[in-house]
Image (cartoon, rainbow, N blue to C red):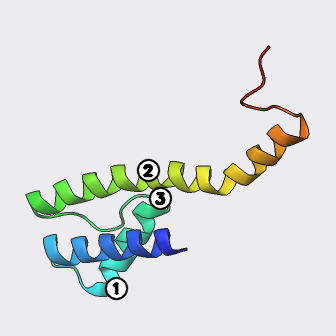
Amino acid sequence: GALIFVSLLGGMIGYHTFEAMSWTDAYLNAAMILSGMGPVGSLNTQSGKIFAGSYALYSGLMVVVSTGIILAPVVHRFLHKFHIDEDEKT
């Protein structure tokens, strides 16, 4: 939850700063990119476009990281169930 909150807040600040969007529009655009849906409004400035592209790349990475964090306990339990040990020699 904290990772999503910080990522969303960073996106809102970026859109508000670089594109002069209202906080509501900045929230909408940041939430849509963070969820993988894509931006809602059009971008008018070069710095806003660079920010949006960078934020989209960051958001994609966060999806991978979040998935890894969520699935780590499941994979760990799976490895224990089949007695797969990292010290075991074949």
Residue type beneath disc 2: Gly
Within 10 Å of disc 3 (Cα), the crowding (few <14, some 14-19, many 20+) is few
Q: Earlier in the sequence, mark 2 or mark 1?
A: 1
Q: Residue at x 24, y 72 (%)?
A: 15
Given the current orientation, which residue lies at the most extreme bottom position? 23
Q: Looking at this rendering, what residue extends furthest in the left direction?
A: 46
Residue 83, quarter of the rendered image? top right
Q: Is residue 77 above or below residue 66?
A: above
Gap in Å between the C-alphas at discs 3 and 2?
Answer: 11 Å
Q: Which residue is mark 3?
A: 37
Give the amino acid type for the residue marked by disc 3 in the picture: Met
Front-lying residue, 42 or 86: 86
Q: Which residue is mark 1?
A: 24
Amino acid at circle 1: Thr
Residue shown at 81%/38% (left/top)? 79
In space, the residues marked 2 and 1 are separated at their CA atoms by 22 Å
- Frontmost of labels 2 and 1 is 2
For marks 1 and 3, the one nearer the N-term is 1
Label 1, label 3: how many angstroms apart (C-alpha)? 17 Å
Q: Residue at x 31, y 70 (%)?
A: 11
User: What x and y, as percent, mark residue 47?
Assistant: 11, 60
Going 47% across and 68% down the picture, which residue do you hit? Answer: 3
Query: How far across and how far down the image is residue 84, in percent?
Result: 82, 31
Task: Write down the residue under mark 2.
Answer: 60
Verify CB contact (< 8 Å) between mark 2 and mark 1: no
